[in-house]
Amino acid sequence: MNTSLLAEERARAWAMPLEQIDVSKGYLFEQDLVGLYFERLRQQDPVHWAVSKRYGGYWSVTRFKDIMTVEVNHDTFSSESGLGGIALAERPGPEMLPSFIAMDPPRHDDQRKTVSPIVAPANLAVLETTIRSRACRILDSLPIGEEFNWVEKVSIELTTQMLATLFDFPFEDRRLLTWWSDMATGDPDGNGPVTSWEQRLQELGHCQAYFTRLWNERVNAPPANDLISMLAHSPVTRNMGPQEFLGNLLLLIVGGNDTTRNSISGGLLALNQHPEQYDKLRANPSLVSSLVPEIIRWQTPLAHMRRTAVKDFELNGKTICKGDKVVMWYLSGNRDEDSIDRANEFIIDRARPRHHLSFGFGIHRCVGNRLAELQLKILWEEILRRYDTIEVTGEPVRTKSNFVHGFTHMPVVIPARRPDAPPRVS
């Protein structure tokens, strides 16, 4: 968006009566305008009651410290799918799939422990070689001097290959995982592949049928180090009903796919938008270690998480009543200048780069956060070995979603390969 149009939108955001502000509208995210409204809410009404035509009434929590208060008070703010789950968008009861992210203790804790070994440090050490070889192969296959879609060729491909490994999913069918991830998070009003609620349900049914076949194979084989085998052999999850099985599958698919893929795209865009930081990185490639968490903060690949109050609670002077929807806007909290120094700047050598909300906090902190960081770290190490620059050549197409904060298309050109680049991996 050009400077004059941005100024007009900022003026509109600050002139609008506070009670009319509803930051849940998808176009605000698609056009990258929602930050203007978050800025005003943080300053003037950080715990803000909004009434949406689509979602009804809900509380917007936009400051870092208030979000943390909601996160740690899980006895007051429930994640249970039966109360609405973890996203602002709700579906009818039969379509609200239970999963461990949409559960409260103790069921949440037991199911989370079932899959957490796959991202334990020892297993990450094993996965590192696989991630690096795949990243090298993907990067070496990219065209030079020719525009291509970074989202499709790099962001989606790397994360989908990793997800197939974690599930021990048939590699030739791995793009089904991308498709089902988009189905799980999309809706007909977005700009993704979901054309109707009926189509979405049908496609998720195909996902369930495919994974049921894999489950039946794994449950009758010795325990193995993949997510399906872990679920099939754990006493906590082996007797899950079909809806809960599908819910946990989609949680693991989306968690392992959408978040990392949009950080991969968002990081390249941020470096192009802040060329002085790109120069700093080229001059000192060791800054990759602090670049990665800064990318994840800056992009905030999941814009929000929702809770439902199970009892009255006072938050920053506002009384949240039992039954109210409470939306923690991570995207806003990660721009809160009161909690993050120079929060509206992209700085790749921050002193505290992991001080952000993108992975959540408390009992629901993202179980795969270290794997996400590892993938980004390896990717940027290998990019810097091969290419001095990757240029974003046009405006990216962003998701029309208030939940998944990402991209569907980002045109780029790689001008040249470094003369000292390692030999290509075919």
Image: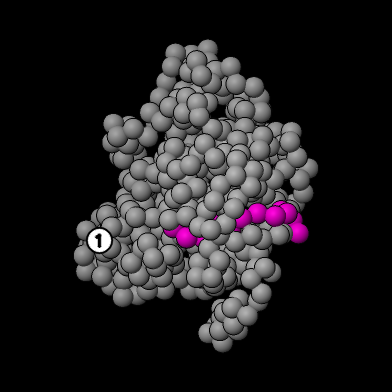
Q: Is residue 198 magenta?
A: no
From the viewer's perspective, is residue 342 above or below residue 26? below
Find residue 393 and report its horizontal and vertical position in percent.
48, 73
Foreground residue, 178 or 298?
Answer: 298
Picture quarter with the N terminus: bottom right
Find residue 126 and report its horizontal and vertical position in percent.
30, 33
Residue at (59% x, 78% y) in the render: 14
Q: Secondary structure at mark 1?
A: loop
Residue at (35% x, 60% y) in the render: 294
* Residue 1 appears left or right of 138: right
Amino acid type, residue under disc 1 in the picture: Ala
Magenta part of the protein: which range?
53-64
* Residue 339 appears left or right of 21: left
Q: Is residue 33 visible?
A: yes
Reading the image, the residue beneath label 1 is 351
From the viewer's perspective, is residue 201 above or below residue 50? above
Find residue 163 and report its horizontal and vertical position in percent.
47, 39
From the viewer's perspective, is residue 39 above or below residue 92? below
Residue at (77% x, 49% y) in the render: 196
Foreground residue, 364 or 169?
Answer: 364
